[in-house]
Amino acid sequence: MSARKAFTTVELITVAALLCGAIALWYYVLMQARMQSGDIEDEQSFHALSASLVGELRRDIRSSLSISSSAPGKWEIDTVSTDRECLPIRETVVYELSQDRLKVRVTRKEKTKTYDFSKASDGKEISFNIIP
């Protein structure tokens, strides 16, 4: 036998197994963090989109003359605003919930703005209702 010291096969296999276990654990933790960050981004997107919709709806309700439901999932709000000469003008704003219950369309002066919750809500239907 030589006087040199070396690692035995059992020691090398033990170290290799421990390294593989540590790498597997690190990979699992990394994947969980990525999944959670994606969920957080979807949740933030949903809250930002809903806050924008609620802000626009509040503005319209505060300046409303009347609110009526013209069809299931469709509401008309008669509002008063001012033009460039500061004269009052009356306009109708239509809020409509899509058939798949994932989008809300707001139509004002022939222009339509769509709030699309399909990506942010993870395919779940949203609850949107205006009670006159």
Image: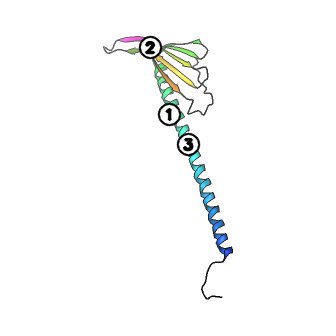
Q: Is residue 94 left or right of residue 26?
A: left
Type of amino acid under label 1: Ala
Camera-near label (1 vs 2) is 2
SS for callout 2: loop
**Dot 1 lies on which element?**
helix
Contact? badges 1 and 2 (CB < 8 Å): no
Left or right, 9 with reference to 34: right
User: Does residue 89 belong to the magenta stretch?
Assistant: yes
- Crowding near pointer 3: few (<14 within 10 Å), some, many (20+)? few
List the residue tagged with mark 1.
Answer: 48
CA gap between label 2 and label 3 equals 36 Å
Which circle's residue, 2 or 3, is located before the other in the chain? Answer: 3
The residue under label 2 is: 110
Q: How many neighbours does mark 1 have within 10 angstroms: few (below 14), some (14-19), or many (20 or more)?
A: few
Q: Does residue 114 belong to the magenta stretch?
A: no
Q: Nearer the viewer, residue 46 or 66?
A: 46
Q: Quadrant of residue 18?
A: bottom right
Q: Farthest residue in the right direction?
A: 10
Query: For the stretch drawn in magenta, what is the main secondary structure?
Result: strand
Q: Earlier in the sequence, mark 3 or mark 1?
A: 3
The dot on residue 38 is 3
Position above or below: 83 against 55: above
Q: Quadrant of the C terminus?
A: top right
The answer to whether one can see residue 16 in this image is yes
Q: Residue at x 37, y 12 (%)?
A: 88
Q: Which residues are magenta?
A: 86-90
Measuring from the top left, give residue 19's x and y in whole percent.
62, 65
Are circles 2 and 3 on residues that touch, CB within 8 Å? Answer: no
In this view, the residue farthest toward the front is 1
Q: Are marks 3 and 1 in contact (CB under 8 Å)?
A: no
Name the amino acid, label 2: Glu
